[in-house]
Image (tube, rainbow, N blue to C red):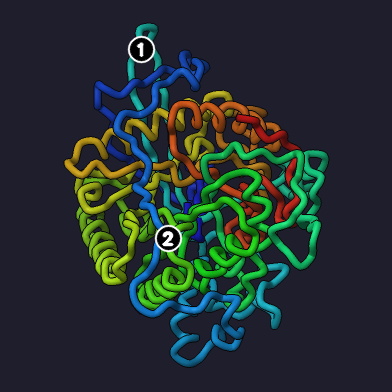
């Protein structure tokens, strides 16, 4: 999904979907006999019993202080806010926010008031929504026969979130007894953000989280303190975050928050790719400035592009001419970033990869990257919740891990996004097509997904980024379940779920 940094709003295609929202796109069937494919009758088999994927190694992480050759850039806390304002060389280099959240979002003044984020963005008409749909069909014959079918849909704008109930109009957030922290982290020492009260309801059980920094939504490039509370909360759930872009100085703001809070956290930095080459250049500069200021100890890799191929391959297949064009352009950008990073003479290697829909991995893409992050969403596959965890694992193995192993460089593979929504803005989009209650966008189904995926994925070696941390109200412009994928609501209250303990 987009933002998936923002990357995008995705929409599913199911037996009841409004055809005006998108069209199905077929992809090649999965035929690798080495990949286990289970029938729906088998889908309740213990997910934790599946073996770890062969050859899926973690991204290479170097050692040492991550020093950068040459003059160091000042950290955010050492630079006056005016240095990050618009205008002037420094300001221009920090303001790569075009197309995040979307290609047109920032060009609509009505979206923002004088303070930045508008409290009530209008819902866009369906005719103005750009939906991208990928249908991946997994066919396999088991001894007792059967078929597992899944649809992976990803957003063109790239980011989805989740909240409370499954009604058409969201009257409740689904937040409550699951958390004692409320909407802010209680500090033991207000002058020391590293000394904060832990929430007994939170457990460090998630391999990673997909996270959209506040700056990417509000365009506030001068308030790193906005990332303090998210860092405190998320450090109690994971030690890894993947970002979606370097827009609005987001990389530096997150790294500053990690430093201030002294939490055990690393990030996969990112550069959003679209047709705006100026924004791309600005992001590269902002990212390199952040590396110079903070070093590389807290950076695991750099993701160039999020669903760029999906956004530019109308056919949705790996054999179309548009796919080849998109891959070639994306790999050119990857090489460009790599050249820039190599020029910094870092003491630690930072792998460079990309993120896209799980169905769009290919050997031609794999040969030019060091890792691939795949968006794999059982909700958009019209899966019943009891089948969701198993399907997610199998889809990822067949479409991404297996392909990565076919090329000489064998890029690492991660699940970039997976999760379950908890509410919908529209009653017609409150179920993924699997029937009720098993296909509902609901807190109950979120709990089931957490219970059947998180610890099991950790045990079998699947590297994943849970999607996502917080509900995102700005996605109301896309309707449906888009704003409601968070483990927390938009006020950072934990929804009424129990975090697994692994």
Residue situated in front as seen by the camera: 33 or 382: 33
Q: Nearer the viewer, mark 1 or mark 2?
A: 2
Residue 371 vs residue 425: left or right? Answer: left
Considering depth in this image, is 463 or 14 the residue closer to the camera?
A: 463
Q: Whole-Å distance between the Cαs marked 1 and 2?
A: 51 Å
Residue where numbered disc 2 is placed: 65
Q: Is residue 232 visible?
A: yes
Can you give x and y, in whole percent of width and height, for residue 392 in the image?
46, 32
Q: Residues within 10 Å of mark 1 (few under 14, many from 20)?
A: some
Residue at 76% x, 67% y: name it.
191
Q: Residue at x 64, y 74 (%)?
A: 223
**Disc 1 marks which residue?**
142
Which residue is depicted at the point 45% across and 78% down? 73
Write down the quadrant of residue 147 in the picture: top left
Q: Residue furthest top?
A: 144
Q: Quadrant of the C terminus?
A: top right
Q: Considering depth in this image, is 118 or 189 the residue closer to the camera? A: 189
In the image, is residue 232 above or below residue 103? above
In what element is the residue under mark 1?
loop
| Residue at 45% over, 46% down | 416
Q: Earlier in the sequence, mark 1 or mark 2?
A: 2
Residue 352, visible in the rendered structure: no
Front residue of this view, candidates 355 and 269: 269
């Amino acid at each position: 999904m987009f933002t998936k940094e923002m990357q995008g709003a995705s929409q599913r295609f199911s037996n009841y979907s409004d055809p005006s929202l998108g069209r199905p796109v077929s992809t090649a069937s999965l035929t690798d006999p080495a990949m286990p494919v289970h029938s729906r009758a088998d889908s309740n088999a213990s997910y934790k019993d599946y073996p770890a994927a062969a050859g899926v190694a973690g991204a290479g992480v170097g050692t040492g202080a991550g020093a950068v050759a040459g003059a160091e850039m000042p950290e955010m806390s050492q630079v006056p806010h005016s240095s990050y304002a618009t205008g002037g060389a420094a300001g221009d280099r920090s303001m790569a926010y075009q197309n995040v959240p979307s290609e047109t979002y920032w060009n609509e003044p009505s979206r923002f008031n004088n303070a930045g984020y508008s409290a009530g963005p209008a819902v866009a008409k369906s005719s103005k929504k750009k939906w991208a749909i990928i249908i991946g069909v997994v066919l396999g014959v088991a001894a007792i026969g059967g078929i597992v079918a899944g649809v992976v849909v990803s957003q063109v704008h790239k980011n989805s979130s989740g909240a409370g109930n499954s009604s058409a109009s969201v009257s409740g957030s689904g937040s409550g007894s699951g958390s004692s922290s409320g909407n802010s982290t209680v500090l033991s020492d207000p002058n020391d953000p590293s000394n904060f009260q832990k929430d007994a309801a939170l457990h460090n059980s998630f391999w990673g989280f997909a996270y959209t920094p506040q700056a990417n939504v509000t365009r506030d490039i001068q308030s790193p303190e906005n990332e303090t509370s998210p860092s405190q909360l998320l450090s109690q759930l994971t030690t890894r975050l993947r970002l979606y872009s370097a827009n609005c100085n987001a990389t530096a703001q997150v790294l500053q928050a990690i430093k201030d809070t002294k939490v055990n956290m690393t990030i996969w930095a990112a550069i959003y790719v679209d047709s705006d080459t100026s924004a791309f250049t600005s992001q590269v500069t902002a990212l390199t400035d952040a590396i110079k200021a903070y070093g590389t100890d807290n950076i695991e890799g750099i993701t160039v592009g999020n669903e760029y191929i999906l956004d530019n391959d109308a056919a949705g297949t790996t054999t179309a001419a548009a796919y080849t064009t998109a891959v070639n352009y994306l790999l050119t950008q990857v090489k460009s970033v790599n050249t820039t990073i190599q020029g910094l003479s870092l003491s630690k290697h930072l792998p460079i990869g990309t993120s896209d829909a799980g169905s769009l991995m290919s050997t031609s893409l794999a040969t030019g990257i060091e890792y691939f992050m795949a968006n794999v969403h059982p909700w958009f596959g019209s899966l019943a919740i009891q089948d969701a965890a198993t399907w997610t694992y199998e889809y990822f193995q067949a479409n991404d891990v297996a392909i990565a192993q076919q090329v000489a460089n064998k890029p690492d593979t991660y699940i970039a996004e997976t999760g379950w929504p908890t509410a919908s803005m529209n009653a017609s989009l409150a179920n993924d097509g699997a029937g009720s209650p098993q296909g509902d966008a609901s807190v109950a189904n979120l709990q089931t997904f957490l219970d059947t995926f998180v610890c099991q994925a950790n045990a079998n070696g699947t590297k994943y980024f849970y999607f996502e941390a917080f509900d995102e109200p700005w996605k109301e412009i896309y309707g449906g379940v888009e704003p409601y994928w968070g483990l927390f609501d938009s006020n950072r209250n934990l929804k009424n779920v129990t975090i697994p303990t692994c």
